[in-house]
C-alpha cells in the first residue's frame, strides 16, 4: 500500500496521532503530579526525619526548578539528535531511579542532589520537552487542541498523585511513597514504548491537517535546514515568546501558591482555604477542555490573551476586594487560565520556528523560563501580597504587549 493510500485511510478513520496525545497526557501527568504538585506532601515528613526545617526541605524544590532550567538545554539537544521515544524512555528511567534513590536517602544533601540533577534531567526530557515535541510533530491543524489535551494530564496528576502520596505516607512511610512513584514511572515506560512513534512520517502518515497532495517524503524533503543556536538567540520572537510566557506562568503559579496563605491572613479557616485549591483544580480541568474546543479557531495568541485576562481579573479581584466569595472567583479565574497558558510555549515555538526546531528552541529557552517561573509565590509573601498583586498586574500587561505580533507566521516555516 503506498503512502497516499495510507494517508487517505488515516483521514477516513481514527488518526494515530491521538494515541500519541494520550501518551503525552500520561507523561505530563506523571511529571507534574509526582514532582511539582506532590512535593509539598513530603516537606513535613522529610523535615521530621532529617531533623531540619521545612524551609531547608523546600530548597530541594527550588533546586529542581534550577536543574530543569539548566539541564533543559541538554535535554533539547538529545531530543534533536536521537529518537524522541527513546529519550522519553531514558527520562522515565532516570525518574524511576531518582525516586527510588530518594527512598534510600540518609542525608539532606542526597535529597538535594537527586531533585536537582537526576529528577530534574529525567523530568524535563519527559515533559514538557519530550511530550510537547511528540504532539507537535503529529499535528499541524488542531495543534492547539492536541497540546491542550496533552497538558490536561497535569490537572489529573494534580488531583490524583498528591493524594496517593499522602495516603501511602500516612499508612506506611515517605520512603514507600517515593517507591510508589518509582513504580509509576516504570509502568508508564511500556505505554511509551508500544504506543509512541516519533513522527507521522515514520508510519507513512502526515502531520494532522497537512494537505493530502503533499506526500510525507515530499514534506520532509521540503523542510528547511535548522537554525544555529546563535541565529535563534538573535531573533526577537525567541525573546517575545520566552518573556511573555515567563511573566504569565510566573503570575499563574504564584496565584496557585499563595491563594491559601493569602486567604488565611483575613480569617479564613484552613478547611475553607483548602476549598480554594479544589476550586482551582476543577476550573483548571474545565478551562483546558474549553480551550481545547476553541483554541484552533481563535489562534494560540488570542487564546493566550484570554488566559492573561483571566489572571489579570484574578489579581484585580484580590487587590480590590477582600471576601471569601471573591477568593472563590479569583481561584476560578486563575485555575481556568491554565489551559491557555501551558500550550503557548510549545505551540508558539512550533508556529514561529517550525516543528522540527521545537526541542532545540525549547531547550534554549528553558533556563529563562523554568528557573524563574517558581519565584512568584515567595515574592508575593515577601511583599505582603497586595504590592505583589499590583506587580503581577503590570507583568501581565507587559506579557500581552510582548505577544501582540506572535500570531503572524514567518515565511517558509514548516508546519
Image (tube, rainbow, N blue to C red):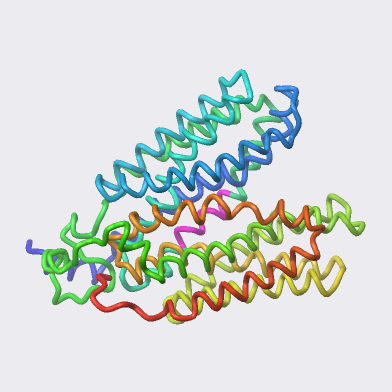
Point out residue 388 in the picture as x, y percentages from the top left corner: 75, 63
Q: Measured along the vertical axis of the image, is residue 93 above or below residue 175?
A: below
On-image quarter of the N terminus: bottom left
Q: Quadrant of residue 111?
A: top right
Residue drawn at the location 34% of the way across and 55% of the way down: 359
Q: Quadrant of residue 262?
A: bottom right
In the displayed orientation, state which residue is furthest to the left: 2
- 340 relative to 172 in the view: left or right: left
Q: Quadrant of residue 392?
A: bottom right
Residue drawn at the location 68% of the way across and 33% of the way down: 57
Residue drawn at the location 79% of the way across and 69% of the way down: 318
Q: Measured along the vertical axis of the image, is residue 306 above or below residue 165?
A: below
Point out residue 225 in the picture as x, y percentages from the top left corner: 19, 63
- 263 relative to 64 in the view: left or right: right
Would residue 295 be visible to someone looking at this image? yes
Q: How many marks?
A: 0
Magenta stretch secondary structure, dominant: helix
Question: Viewer-proximal residue, 10 or 394?
Answer: 394
Question: Viewer-proximal residue, 363 or 309?
Answer: 363
Q: Measured along the vertical axis of the image, is residue 51 above or below residue 148?
A: above
- 20 relative to 243 in the view: left or right: left
Point out residue 255 in the picture as x, y percentages from the top left corner: 70, 60
Point out residue 217 in the picture as x, y percentages from the top left corner: 11, 64
In this picture, which residue range is highlighted in magenta? Answer: 149-157
Would residue 34 be visible to someone looking at this image? no
Residue 143 highlighted magenta (yes or no): no
Residue drawn at the location 56% of the way across and 76% of the way down: 400
On-image quarter of the C terminus: bottom left
In the displayed orientation, state which residue is furthest to the right: 267
Question: Viewer-proximal residue, 46 or 206?
Answer: 46
Amino acid at each position: 500500500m503506498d503512502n497516499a493510500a495510507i494517508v487517505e485511510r488515516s483521514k477516513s478513520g481514527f488518526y494515530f496521532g491521538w494515541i500519541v496525545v494520550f501518551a503525552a497526557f500520561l507523561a505530563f501527568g506523571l511529571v507534574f503530579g509526582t514532582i511539582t504538585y506532590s512535593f509539598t506532601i513530603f516537606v513535613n515528613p522529610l523535615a521530621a526525619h532529617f531533623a531540619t526545617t521545612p524551609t531547608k526541605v523546600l530548597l530541594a524544590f527550588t533546586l529542581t526548578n534550577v536543574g530543569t532550567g539548566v539541564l533543559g538545554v541538554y535535554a533539547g539537544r538529545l531530543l534533536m539528535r536521537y529518537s524522541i521515544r527513546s529519550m522519553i524512555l531514558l527520562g522515565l528511567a532516570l525518574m524511576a531511579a531518582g525516586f527510588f534513590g530518594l527512598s534510600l536517602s540518609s542525608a539532606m544533601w542526597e535529597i538535594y542532589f537527586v531533585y536537582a540533577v537526576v529528577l530534574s534531567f529525567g523530568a524535563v526530557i519527559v515533559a514538557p520537552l519530550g511530550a510537547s515535541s511528540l504532539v507537535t510533530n503529529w499535528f499541524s491543524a488542531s495543534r492547539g487542541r492536541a497540546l491542550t489535551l496533552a497538558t490536561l494530564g497535569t490537572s489529573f496528576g494534580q488531583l490524583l498523585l498528591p493524594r496517593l502520596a499522602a495516603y501511602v505516607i500516612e499508612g506506611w512511610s515517605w520512603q514507600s511513597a517515593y517507591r510508589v512513584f518509582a513504580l509509576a514511572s516504570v509502568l508508564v515506560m511500556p505505554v511509551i514504548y508500544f504506543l509512541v512513534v516519533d513522527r507521522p512520517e515514520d508510519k507513512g502518515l502526515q502531520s494532522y491537517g497537512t494537505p493530502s497532495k503533499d506526500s510525507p517524503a515530499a514534506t520532509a524533503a521540503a523542510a528547511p535546514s535548522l537554525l544555529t543556536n546563535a541565529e535563534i538567540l538573535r531573533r526577537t520572537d525567541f525573546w517575545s515568546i520566552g518573556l511573555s510566557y515567563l511573566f504569565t506562568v510566573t503570575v499563574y503559579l504564584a496565584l496557585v501558591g499563595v491563594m491559601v496563605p493569602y486567604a488565611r491572613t483575613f480569617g479564613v479557616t484552613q478547611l475553607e482555604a483548602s476549598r480554594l485549591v479544589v476550586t482551582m483544580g476543577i476550573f483548571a480541568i474545565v478551562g483546558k477542555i474549553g480551550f481545547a474546543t476553541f483554541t484552533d479557531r481563535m489562534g494560540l495568541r488570542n487564546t493566550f490573551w484570554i488566559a492573561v485576562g483571566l489572571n489579570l481579573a484574578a489579581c484585580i479581584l484580590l487587590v480590590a476586594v477582600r471576601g471569601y466569595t471573591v477568593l472563590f472567583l479569583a481561584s476560578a479565574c486563575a485555575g481556568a487560565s491554565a489551559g491557555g497558558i501551558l500550550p503557548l510555549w510549545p505551540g508558539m515555538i512550533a508556529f514561529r520556528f517550525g516543528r522540527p526546531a521545537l526541542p532545540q528552541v525549547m531547550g534554549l529557552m528553558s533556563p529563562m523560563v523554568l528557573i524563574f517561573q517558581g519565584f512568584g509565590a515567595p515574592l508575593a509573601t515577601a511583599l505582603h501580597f497586595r504590592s505583589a498583586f499590583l506587580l503581577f498586574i503590570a507583568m501581565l500587561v507587559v506579557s500581552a504587549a510582548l505577544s501582540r505580533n506572535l500570531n503572524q507566521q514567518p515565511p517558509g516555516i514548516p508546519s
